[in-house]
Image (cartoon, grey):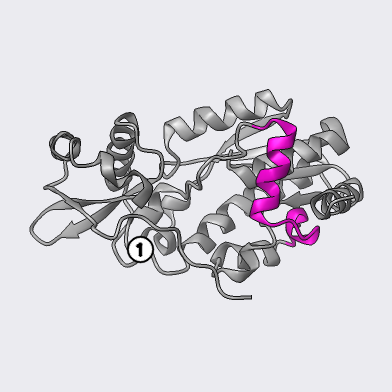
Amino acid sequence: MSQPGTKLAALRTVLKGAGPLLVAYSGGADSTFLLAEAVEVLGDAALGILADSPSLPRSALARALKTAKECGANVEVITTAELDDPRYASNPTNRCYFCKLELFTQMQEIAVTRGFATLAYGENADDAFQVRPGATAAREFRVMAPLREAGLTKAEIRLLSRERGLSTADLPAQPCLSSRIPHGTGVTRDALRMVEYAEEFVRACGFLVFRVRYISQPGRAATAKLQIDPSEADKLASLEGKIRSAVRDIGFYDLVVDPAGYRPPPQIAR
Protein backbone atom coordinates (compact mmCIF):
# COMPACT_ATOMS: atom_id res chain seq x y z
CA MET A 1 0.00 0.00 0.00
CA SER A 2 1.31 3.49 -0.88
CA GLN A 3 2.07 5.98 1.86
CA PRO A 4 -1.11 8.01 1.17
CA GLY A 5 -3.05 4.75 1.17
CA THR A 6 -1.58 3.78 4.54
CA LYS A 7 -2.47 7.18 5.96
CA LEU A 8 -5.98 6.89 4.53
CA ALA A 9 -6.43 3.59 6.36
CA ALA A 10 -5.22 5.29 9.55
CA LEU A 11 -7.71 8.14 9.02
CA ARG A 12 -10.59 5.72 8.67
CA THR A 13 -9.55 3.96 11.88
CA VAL A 14 -9.54 7.30 13.71
CA LEU A 15 -12.96 8.19 12.33
CA LYS A 16 -14.42 4.81 13.17
CA GLY A 17 -13.47 5.32 16.81
CA ALA A 18 -14.81 8.87 16.95
CA GLY A 19 -18.44 7.88 17.34
CA PRO A 20 -21.18 10.29 16.20
CA LEU A 21 -19.16 13.17 14.76
CA LEU A 22 -19.66 16.87 14.06
CA VAL A 23 -17.28 18.17 11.39
CA ALA A 24 -16.48 21.87 11.01
CA TYR A 25 -17.01 22.20 7.27
CA SER A 26 -16.00 25.16 5.09
CA GLY A 27 -16.12 23.66 1.61
CA GLY A 28 -12.34 23.81 1.23
CA ALA A 29 -10.15 20.90 0.18
CA ASP A 30 -9.33 19.70 3.69
CA SER A 31 -12.73 19.87 5.37
CA THR A 32 -14.47 18.47 2.30
CA PHE A 33 -12.18 15.45 2.21
CA LEU A 34 -12.59 14.96 5.97
CA LEU A 35 -16.38 15.16 5.76
CA ALA A 36 -16.52 12.82 2.77
CA GLU A 37 -14.42 10.25 4.61
CA ALA A 38 -16.48 10.68 7.78
CA VAL A 39 -19.65 9.97 5.82
CA GLU A 40 -17.98 6.95 4.22
CA VAL A 41 -17.08 5.54 7.64
CA LEU A 42 -19.93 6.75 9.87
CA GLY A 43 -22.83 7.34 7.50
CA ASP A 44 -25.57 9.49 9.02
CA ALA A 45 -23.61 9.65 12.29
CA ALA A 46 -21.41 12.28 10.63
CA LEU A 47 -22.76 15.81 10.23
CA GLY A 48 -21.05 18.83 8.72
CA ILE A 49 -21.48 22.23 10.36
CA LEU A 50 -21.04 25.20 8.04
CA ALA A 51 -20.55 28.58 9.73
CA ASP A 52 -22.16 31.48 7.91
CA SER A 53 -21.21 35.09 8.64
CA PRO A 54 -20.36 38.28 6.71
CA SER A 55 -16.78 36.99 6.32
CA LEU A 56 -17.98 34.11 4.11
CA PRO A 57 -18.60 35.05 0.45
CA ARG A 58 -22.03 34.09 -0.85
CA SER A 59 -20.40 32.22 -3.73
CA ALA A 60 -18.34 30.17 -1.27
CA LEU A 61 -21.44 29.31 0.74
CA ALA A 62 -23.28 28.13 -2.37
CA ARG A 63 -20.28 26.13 -3.58
CA ALA A 64 -19.82 24.45 -0.18
CA LEU A 65 -23.46 23.35 -0.06
CA LYS A 66 -23.27 22.03 -3.61
CA THR A 67 -20.06 20.12 -2.85
CA ALA A 68 -21.56 18.55 0.26
CA LYS A 69 -24.54 17.38 -1.75
CA GLU A 70 -22.24 15.88 -4.40
CA CYS A 71 -20.46 13.75 -1.79
CA GLY A 72 -23.67 12.72 -0.03
CA ALA A 73 -22.97 14.56 3.21
CA ASN A 74 -25.52 16.06 5.54
CA VAL A 75 -24.64 19.68 6.35
CA GLU A 76 -26.31 22.23 8.59
CA VAL A 77 -25.66 25.97 8.27
CA ILE A 78 -25.34 27.92 11.49
CA THR A 79 -25.06 31.69 11.85
CA THR A 80 -21.97 32.75 13.77
CA ALA A 81 -21.60 36.17 15.36
CA GLU A 82 -17.84 36.63 15.67
CA LEU A 83 -18.15 40.09 14.11
CA ASP A 84 -20.17 41.19 17.16
CA ASP A 85 -17.23 40.29 19.41
CA PRO A 86 -15.00 43.39 19.75
CA ARG A 87 -12.01 41.11 20.31
CA TYR A 88 -12.53 39.78 16.78
CA ALA A 89 -13.68 43.02 15.15
CA SER A 90 -10.59 44.90 16.36
CA ASN A 91 -8.60 42.51 14.13
CA PRO A 92 -5.70 41.46 16.35
CA THR A 93 -3.07 39.01 15.14
CA ASN A 94 -4.98 36.19 16.85
CA ARG A 95 -8.31 37.15 15.25
CA CYS A 96 -8.83 33.58 14.03
CA TYR A 97 -8.88 32.37 17.63
CA PHE A 98 -12.06 34.31 18.34
CA CYS A 99 -13.67 33.05 15.12
CA LYS A 100 -13.01 29.43 16.07
CA LEU A 101 -14.06 30.16 19.65
CA GLU A 102 -17.49 31.19 18.35
CA LEU A 103 -17.72 28.22 16.01
CA PHE A 104 -16.65 25.57 18.50
CA THR A 105 -18.90 27.03 21.22
CA GLN A 106 -21.91 26.57 18.97
CA MET A 107 -20.77 23.14 17.80
CA GLN A 108 -20.32 21.99 21.38
CA GLU A 109 -23.86 23.08 22.21
CA ILE A 110 -25.17 21.08 19.24
CA ALA A 111 -23.13 18.05 20.29
CA VAL A 112 -24.45 18.13 23.84
CA THR A 113 -28.10 18.60 22.92
CA ARG A 114 -28.12 16.12 20.03
CA GLY A 115 -25.86 13.34 21.23
CA PHE A 116 -22.71 13.79 19.13
CA ALA A 117 -19.63 12.38 20.82
CA THR A 118 -16.86 14.31 19.07
CA LEU A 119 -16.04 17.54 17.28
CA ALA A 120 -13.56 17.53 14.40
CA TYR A 121 -12.01 20.02 12.02
CA GLY A 122 -9.82 19.91 8.94
CA GLU A 123 -6.32 20.74 10.20
CA ASN A 124 -3.78 18.70 8.23
CA ALA A 125 -0.23 17.58 8.97
CA ASP A 126 1.29 20.63 7.24
CA ASP A 127 -0.73 23.07 9.33
CA ALA A 128 1.27 22.27 12.44
CA PHE A 129 4.16 24.15 10.83
CA GLN A 130 2.18 27.37 10.43
CA VAL A 131 1.01 29.94 12.96
CA ARG A 132 -2.70 29.15 13.37
CA PRO A 133 -4.42 30.84 16.32
CA GLY A 134 -7.57 28.84 15.62
CA ALA A 135 -5.72 25.70 16.67
CA THR A 136 -5.54 27.09 20.20
CA ALA A 137 -9.33 27.20 20.36
CA ALA A 138 -9.46 23.66 18.97
CA ARG A 139 -7.24 22.42 21.79
CA GLU A 140 -9.34 24.20 24.40
CA PHE A 141 -12.50 22.51 23.11
CA ARG A 142 -10.72 19.18 22.52
CA VAL A 143 -11.62 19.24 18.84
CA MET A 144 -10.11 16.35 16.92
CA ALA A 145 -7.94 16.88 13.86
CA PRO A 146 -8.21 13.46 12.16
CA LEU A 147 -6.27 14.47 9.03
CA ARG A 148 -3.35 15.63 11.16
CA GLU A 149 -3.55 12.55 13.38
CA ALA A 150 -3.31 10.35 10.28
CA GLY A 151 -0.31 12.37 9.06
CA LEU A 152 -2.01 13.51 5.86
CA THR A 153 -0.36 16.49 4.15
CA LYS A 154 -2.12 18.98 1.90
CA ALA A 155 -0.60 17.37 -1.22
CA GLU A 156 -1.79 13.92 -0.13
CA ILE A 157 -5.28 15.24 0.63
CA ARG A 158 -5.47 16.74 -2.86
CA LEU A 159 -4.26 13.45 -4.37
CA LEU A 160 -6.78 11.37 -2.45
CA SER A 161 -9.54 13.88 -3.18
CA ARG A 162 -8.77 13.53 -6.88
CA GLU A 163 -9.00 9.76 -6.59
CA ARG A 164 -12.40 10.17 -4.89
CA GLY A 165 -13.55 12.53 -7.63
CA LEU A 166 -14.06 15.45 -5.26
CA SER A 167 -14.41 18.80 -7.00
CA THR A 168 -12.26 20.42 -4.31
CA ALA A 169 -9.13 18.45 -5.21
CA ASP A 170 -7.52 21.43 -6.95
CA LEU A 171 -9.50 24.22 -5.30
CA PRO A 172 -7.20 27.09 -4.31
CA ALA A 173 -7.12 28.03 -0.64
CA GLN A 174 -9.69 30.71 0.19
CA PRO A 175 -9.35 32.05 3.75
CA CYS A 176 -12.22 34.14 5.05
CA LEU A 177 -12.72 37.69 3.82
CA SER A 178 -11.44 39.14 7.11
CA SER A 179 -7.97 37.92 6.14
CA ARG A 180 -7.92 40.62 3.43
CA ILE A 181 -7.95 43.36 6.08
CA PRO A 182 -4.57 44.10 7.72
CA HIS A 183 -4.30 43.34 11.42
CA GLY A 184 -5.14 46.44 13.46
CA THR A 185 -7.64 47.72 10.91
CA GLY A 186 -11.14 47.05 12.22
CA VAL A 187 -13.26 44.40 10.52
CA THR A 188 -16.64 45.81 9.52
CA ARG A 189 -19.53 44.54 7.47
CA ASP A 190 -18.99 47.31 4.91
CA ALA A 191 -15.32 46.44 4.48
CA LEU A 192 -16.12 42.74 4.05
CA ARG A 193 -18.83 43.56 1.52
CA MET A 194 -16.45 45.72 -0.53
CA VAL A 195 -13.78 43.02 -0.58
CA GLU A 196 -16.32 40.35 -1.52
CA TYR A 197 -17.72 42.34 -4.44
CA ALA A 198 -14.25 43.28 -5.67
CA GLU A 199 -13.02 39.69 -5.59
CA GLU A 200 -16.14 38.46 -7.36
CA PHE A 201 -15.44 40.96 -10.14
CA VAL A 202 -11.78 39.94 -10.44
CA ARG A 203 -12.85 36.28 -10.53
CA ALA A 204 -15.35 37.08 -13.27
CA CYS A 205 -12.45 38.54 -15.26
CA GLY A 206 -10.95 35.05 -15.38
CA PHE A 207 -8.39 35.10 -12.55
CA LEU A 208 -8.14 32.05 -10.30
CA VAL A 209 -5.57 32.79 -7.57
CA PHE A 210 -5.50 36.32 -6.19
CA ARG A 211 -6.41 38.55 -3.27
CA VAL A 212 -7.99 41.99 -2.96
CA ARG A 213 -6.64 43.64 0.19
CA TYR A 214 -8.50 46.40 2.02
CA ILE A 215 -6.07 49.23 2.79
CA SER A 216 -7.54 51.95 4.99
CA GLN A 217 -6.73 55.57 4.13
CA PRO A 218 -7.07 58.41 6.69
CA GLY A 219 -9.67 60.90 5.58
CA ARG A 220 -10.86 58.99 2.51
CA ALA A 221 -12.20 55.67 1.34
CA ALA A 222 -10.02 52.58 1.50
CA THR A 223 -7.78 51.55 -1.39
CA ALA A 224 -8.04 48.10 -2.99
CA LYS A 225 -4.67 46.36 -3.25
CA LEU A 226 -4.75 43.67 -5.91
CA GLN A 227 -2.37 40.72 -5.72
CA ILE A 228 -2.39 38.34 -8.67
CA ASP A 229 -0.60 35.00 -8.78
CA PRO A 230 2.54 35.44 -10.92
CA SER A 231 1.37 32.67 -13.26
CA GLU A 232 -1.63 34.83 -14.22
CA ALA A 233 0.08 38.22 -14.24
CA ASP A 234 0.27 38.45 -18.04
CA LYS A 235 -3.53 38.77 -18.24
CA LEU A 236 -3.67 41.80 -15.98
CA ALA A 237 -2.42 44.55 -18.33
CA SER A 238 -5.49 44.44 -20.56
CA LEU A 239 -7.91 44.23 -17.62
CA GLU A 240 -6.44 46.60 -15.05
CA GLY A 241 -8.45 49.63 -16.19
CA LYS A 242 -11.67 47.64 -16.12
CA ILE A 243 -10.94 46.36 -12.61
CA ARG A 244 -10.00 49.85 -11.40
CA SER A 245 -13.31 51.25 -12.59
CA ALA A 246 -15.21 48.41 -10.92
CA VAL A 247 -13.55 48.76 -7.51
CA ARG A 248 -14.21 52.50 -7.54
CA ASP A 249 -17.88 51.79 -8.22
CA ILE A 250 -17.86 49.36 -5.29
CA GLY A 251 -16.66 52.13 -2.98
CA PHE A 252 -12.87 51.96 -2.96
CA TYR A 253 -10.93 55.17 -3.53
CA ASP A 254 -8.60 53.52 -6.04
CA LEU A 255 -6.82 50.35 -7.09
CA VAL A 256 -3.14 49.62 -6.63
CA VAL A 257 -1.50 46.53 -8.08
CA ASP A 258 1.11 44.78 -5.98
CA PRO A 259 4.12 44.22 -8.30
CA ALA A 260 5.17 41.21 -6.21
CA GLY A 261 1.84 39.54 -6.89
CA TYR A 262 0.17 37.02 -4.62
CA ARG A 263 2.13 34.28 -2.93
CA PRO A 264 0.77 31.98 -0.21
CA PRO A 265 2.26 32.45 3.28
CA PRO A 266 5.42 30.40 3.79
CA GLN A 267 5.40 27.36 6.01
CA ILE A 268 7.72 27.10 8.97
CA ALA A 269 10.61 24.78 8.11
CA ARG A 270 10.28 21.29 9.48
Judge whether residue 229 can be spotted in this image.
no
Residue 197: x and y in percent read 29, 35
Judge whether residue 26 can be spotted in this image.
yes
Q: Residue at x 79, y 51 (%)?
A: 4
Q: Is residue 146 magenta?
A: yes
Q: Secondary structure at mark 1?
A: loop
Magenta stretch: give its range: 142-166
- When the figure is inspected, residue 2 is found, relative to residue 43, above or below; the finding is below
Q: Residue at x 50, y 60 (%)?
A: 96
Most distant residue in the left direction: 219
Residue 65: x and y in percent read 59, 28
Residue position marked by numbered label 1 in the rendering:
90
Q: Is residue 233 magenta?
A: no
Asked whether, in this view, residue 210 is left or right of residue 142, the answer is left
- When the figure is inspected, residue 70 is found, relative to residue 249, above or below; the finding is above
Residue 85 found in image quarter = bottom left
Residue 41 found in image quarter = top right
What secondary structure characterizes most of the magenta part? helix
